[in-house]
Image (spheres, grey):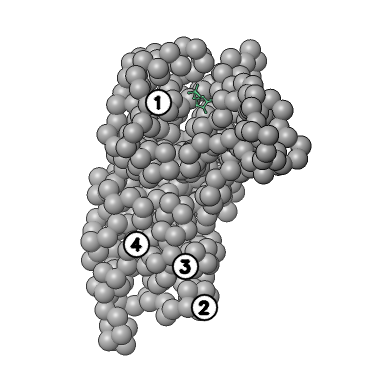
Amino acid sequence: MTAASLSAARILLIIGGGIAAYKSLELIRRLRERGARVRVIMTQAGKHFIAPLSAAALSGQKVYDDLFSLTDEAEMGHIELSREADLLVVAPATADLIARMAQGLAHDLATTALLATDKRTLIAPAMNLRMWLHPATRRNVALLERDDVLFVGPMDGEMACGEFGPGRMAEPLEIVAAIEAALANTTVIPLPGGARAAFSSALAGMHVLVTSGPTHEAIDPVRFLANRSSGRQGHAIAEAAREAGARVTLVAGPVALPDPAGVQTLHVESAREMLTAVENALPADIFIAAAAVADWRAAQPGRNKIKKGGGPPTLKLVENPDILATIAGAARGRPRLVVGFAAETENVLDNARAKLRAKKTDLIVANDVGGESGVFGGRSNLVHLVSADGVDSWPAMDKSEVGRRLIARLAAMLGAGS
Ligand code: C5P
């Protein structure tokens, strides 16, 4: 789920008529700087809020708005517009546009393109909170969910109308992250209760703290102890928490991954630096220790490079602080939920149960990293969730999907977003 997934993507962006339309211009820029090609359709109402010329200049493409334009049809028919796209994105999606999508109406170019597609559609709703909460909109949203339309937002916040609550369109980078997730997953993500719309605000107002990646423990200025963790799973969890509306702090060891959009990322090297960064980032509602922290470090790292000759040196190791156990066992300020990972090569479930008790965590995500599993550094993961209630084993799936399901599960445990 990096910018690479956007680099060859073709996005058809439909801009509806809402005050949030100005953010769609920024969205076009963010998508194009990641290498995506963006074609824009504007509704008649959309043109009242931003000028088609601005969207054309930023997208570098003609903007389409007329279903019955002979010149447009000669250049690119309306069916072709949605056929050639990898993903359709509606931002802002107004209450009216959502209602028309839900009914399958097709009396203008935007709704015709939305109906003529066999591609996935992601929508970023934006409207007054009473319109969002109105039973008619609730019904329409439920219909679109059933049709596997993806949602990002709306977010809580102050709106142009002066009211506060759900209805504000997701920020451009949040929409970019949702587009990347939609492009990376060919299947629709099943979330508990089928609540994809609720997912985008399930952790609103919460602070989620995540550790990710390996740690490097210096032996001397040029050598270190490390492990094979890529950080993919931890980073995917941080992204999923962000998608669910949380404020997210990610404490990352040395990884070759980009910082996730919209996530405050703190870079550290060693276990002790990671512990300090985590303690400084508290308080948090949820702490997820996905990092593969080195258990030991050199007792006395060489101040200069250790020279060859005189036989191999003896490396004396001392134990590193256990970040997970420290935070889970804190007498004061313990996050409401503490989640650990258990990378095991044998007796996966027994070891996970023992870790759940020993480290006083609420949940252990256990995975078998032995042999040929390819979990370390790979894109997919096979996990068992071990809690006091028992074991829940999930089928193998993409790490980003593990992230989203885990976040949905934690939101359910906190009774949020339901
Ligand atoms: O005991 P073990 O290292 O297998 O436990 C794994 C879990 O503990 C992971 O969640 C990991 O992030 C966390 N851990 C930690 N600090 C350590 C060692 C492990 O936070 N020093």
Q: Report how far apart the C-alphas of labels 2 and 4 lie in the structure.
A: 20 Å
Distance from the alpha carbon under mark 3 to that under mark 4: 16 Å
Question: As shown in the figure, which amino acid type bears the numbered disc 3?
Answer: Gly
Disc 2 under 8 Å from ligand 1? The reply is no
Q: Nearer the viewer, mark 2 or mark 1?
A: 1
Residue depth check, mark 2 versus mark 3: number of the one nearer the observer = 3
Along the line of sight, which residue is nearer the eye, 251 or 137?
251
Q: Which residue is mark 4?
A: 88
**Dot 4: element:** strand
Q: Residues within 10 Å of mark 2 (few under 14, many from 20)?
A: few
Task: Look at the picture and state if 34 lies above or below 213.
Answer: below
Q: Give the residue pinned by disc 1.
A: 344
* Pointer 2 residue: 57
Name the residue: 65% across, 15% down.
332
Q: Please give the residue where the numbered disc 3 appears in the rendered image.
A: 35
Viewer-nearest of labels 3 and 4?
Answer: 3
Question: What is the C-alpha distance between the residues marked 2 and 3?
Answer: 16 Å
Residue behind label 1 places its C-beta within 8 angstroms of ligand 1: yes
Q: Which numbered disc flags the more N-terminal residue, 2 or 3?
A: 3
> Is residue 365 shown to the viewer in this render?
no
Secondary structure at numbered mark 1: strand
Between tags 1 and 3, which lies in front? 1
